[in-house]
Image (spheres, rainbow, N blue to C red):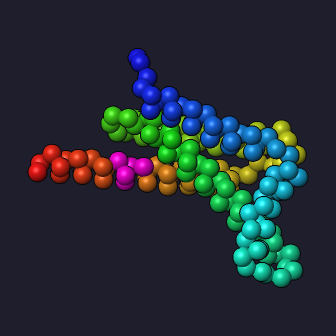
Amino acid sequence: MKLSKKSYVGIIVLALVLGFVFVNSILNWNTSMLLSKLPERLAYSVVSYGDYKWLDNFVIHQIRGFAHLSEFFVLSVVITKLYYSKRINPQRLINTFFMFFLISFLDETIQMFTDRHARISDIWLDLLGATIGFLVYLLCYFIKKLIIKRKQSV
């Protein structure tokens, strides 16, 4: 089976996103927290909260949660685009969510070999981000089909 140029680009983007996810999992706790502090500093430059330690922890937790959601949102859109090039069926749906789970599970498992901790809540956030990305892709897919169908009937 010959791959199209779009498929090659999709595979490269998929490799880059997976690399980003797994490289971030390999980072030690200090480096990971330092990277999480960058968006926190940006948030604090916009809104000053004062010197509240509990709020710092809350903001860090929200930023890290958003990172999980956004990584897996992008990942799911790329995987779904590659996997659903022609049609959607129930078996592919099951396979897709199994892939999302395996990648998320592997992501958290990698962290067990560093000084960080694997968290079930991170797997849930990953799966939520993947589900949202999948649903957004499907919505766009069906809207595109509807537009094409209407143009053909005119």
**Extreme-top residue of the structure:** 1
Of the pair 151 and 52, the residue shown nearer to us: 151
Residue 60 shown left or right of residue 93 in the figure: right
Give residue 112's quadrant in the image. top right
| Highlighted range, magenta | 137-141
- Magenta-drawn stretch contains 23: no
User: How far across and down, in percent of the image, does residue 56 sit?
Assistant: 81, 72
User: How far across and down, in percent of the image, does residue 57 sit?
Assistant: 80, 69
- Residue 43 in view: yes
Give residue 65's quadrant in the image. bottom right
The answer to whether residue 125 is above or below residue 113 is below
Residue beneath the point at 85% across and 79% down: 52
Residue beneath the point at 88% across and 52% down: 30
Residue beneath the point at 30% across and 49% down: 144
Q: Give the total of numbered labels.
A: 0
Residue beneath the point at 73% across and 52% down: 119
- Residue 94 in view: no
Give residue 128's quadrant in the image. bottom right
Q: Main secondary structure of the magenta part?
A: helix
User: How far across and down, in percent of the image, does residue 73 sit?
Assistant: 55, 51
The answer to whether residue 4 is above or below residue 146 is above
User: How far across and down, in percent of the image, does residue 142 sit?
Assistant: 31, 50
Residue 74 shown left or right of residue 136 in the figure: right
Residue 44 shown left or right of residue 86 in the figure: right
Which quadrant of the rendered structure holds the N terminus?
top left
